[in-house]
Image (cartoon, grey):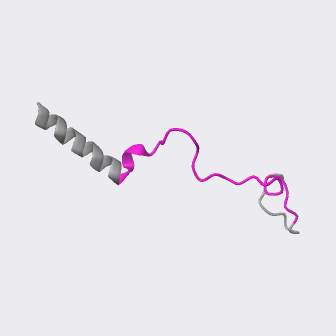
Amino acid sequence: RTGQKDHMFGIRDGSTANGYQKRGRKPGRRTDFMNDPDVIAKRQKALARMEAAE
């Protein structure tokens, strides 16, 4: 019953009344780091540089 966004009579209960907002992403290290296009591109560039250095 508590923690719902809106009571049926518009009484804001639980978290919304306390002004708590859900965060979109957790703080801390990115977990979806490897599926980022620019990250992948950067990695490929780095790998290519390593191959050239050998």
Name the residue rendered at 48%, 42% in the picture. Answer: 30
| Start-end of magenta stretch | 11-37
In the picture, measured across the screen, residue 41 lies left or right of residue 52, that is right
In front here: 34 or 27? 27
Q: Say if the magenta span includes residue 48.
A: no
Name the residue rendered at 84%, 63% in the picture. Answer: 7
Residue 46 location (% of width, % of height): 24, 40
In the picture, measured across the screen, residue 1 lies left or right of residue 51, that is right
Residue 48 location (% of width, % of height): 17, 41
- In this rendering, the answer to whether 24 lies above or below 11 is above
Task: State how many labels appear.
Answer: 0
In front here: 17 or 42? 42
Q: Say if the magenta span includes residue 29.
A: yes
In the picture, measured across the screen, residue 29 lies left or right of residue 39, that is right
- In this rendering, the answer to whether 27 lies above or below 23 is above
Name the residue rendered at 88%, 64% in the picture. Answer: 11
Determine the image quadrant of residue 33: top left
Quadrant the C terminus occupies: top left
In front here: 24 or 7? 24
Q: Residue furthest bottom?
A: 9
Residue 51 location (% of width, % of height): 14, 36
Residue 9 location (% of width, % of height): 88, 69
The secondary structure that most of the magenta stretch takes on is loop
